[in-house]
Amino acid sequence: MKRRNVLLTIGAALIIALFLLTTLFVQTVGNQGHATRVACVGDSITLGTGYTIDLWRRLGPNYVIGNFGVGGATVSSETDSSYMNQTAFQVAENFEPNIVIIMLGTNDANANLTQSTTAFASDYIKLIEAFQDLASKPKVWIAEPPPIYNNSAGLSSELLTQIVIPGIQLAAAQTHLPLIDANTTLVNQPSKFIDGVHPNSVGAQTIANTIYYALISQNDR
């Protein structure tokens, strides 16, 4: 009986560990010694497309990339999936990044949300300021997410262009932060998407290249 209880306890622990691993995936690539620490914050486009790996390959060994994407994450505080309510947000802060790249908004392009552009921008600014308040004083970059094509996830291209993108631009203007356009680089290119929402490997490389050139051009000034 005792052996059975021990096995049940071990089994329960393994189930809990598996649950944690499947609900929070944080990937870091690069030598973490004295490298520049880059936190990539976002949703499943950040988490699963591989753009962060492509970005690290472009940046080289003097950078370490932390992937803090969360599937389904939103900017809006109206949802249970708001990024600031996710464990990954806390882990990203503990990463003590030197650079933060935020690419969120795709999941906010949902007809079930009733937010305005102003409300969206306000929630986005709260997220930005949370990273700016870190002791590492990271440089924050805002990336406009890629276009949305025909999909089964209930996400709207119209809401992305009419509410989300203007909200991101408003947040960037009010915080005086650099804006990376990962949207127009993939306009009219549905072939670079797996399901109308998530870029394939070629689309991910396009995003990585866009972010890379933005970072490098800023460093050259």
Image: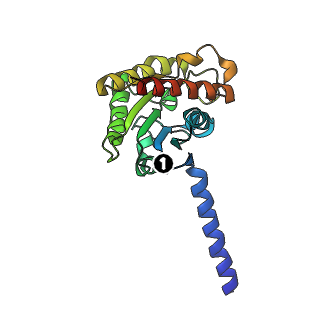
Give coordinates of residue 119: x percent, y percent: 34, 28
Q: Quadrant of residue 187?
A: top right
Give coordinates of residue 29: x percent, y percent: 58, 45
Tell how many labels.
1
Of 60 and 156, nearer the camera is 60
Q: Quadrant of residue 163?
A: top left
Label 1 Cα crowd, 10 Å radius (few <14 / some 14-19 / many 20+): many
Image-based side of 55 in relation to 218, left or right: right
Give coordinates of residue 22: x percent, y percent: 61, 52
- Judged from the image, the secondary structure of the residue bearing numbered disc 1 is helix
- Considering every residue shown, the one lying at the far bottom of the view is 1
Of 79 and 53, nearer the camera is 53
Compared with residue 150, is residue 3 higher up or lower down, i.e. above or below?
A: below
Q: Quadrant of residue 128?
A: top left
Image-based side of 4 in relation to 210, left or right: right
Compared with residue 181, is residue 46 higher up or lower down, i.e. above or below?
A: below
Give coordinates of residue 148: x percent, y percent: 58, 22
Q: Quadrant of the N terminus?
A: bottom right
Of 98 and 90, nearer the camera is 98
Q: Residue at x 41, y 34 (%)?
A: 76
Compared with residue 53, is residue 1 higher up or lower down, i.e. above or below?
A: below
**As shown in the figure, which amino acid type bears the numbered disc 1?**
Ala
Mark 1, residue position: 88
Q: Quadrant of the C terminus?
A: top left
Q: Residue at x 43, y 35 (%)?
A: 75
Image-based side of 87 in relation to 137, left or right: right
Query: How is the rendered protein coloured?
Result: rainbow
- Residue 67 seen in this snapshot: no
- Residue 160 seen in this snapshot: yes
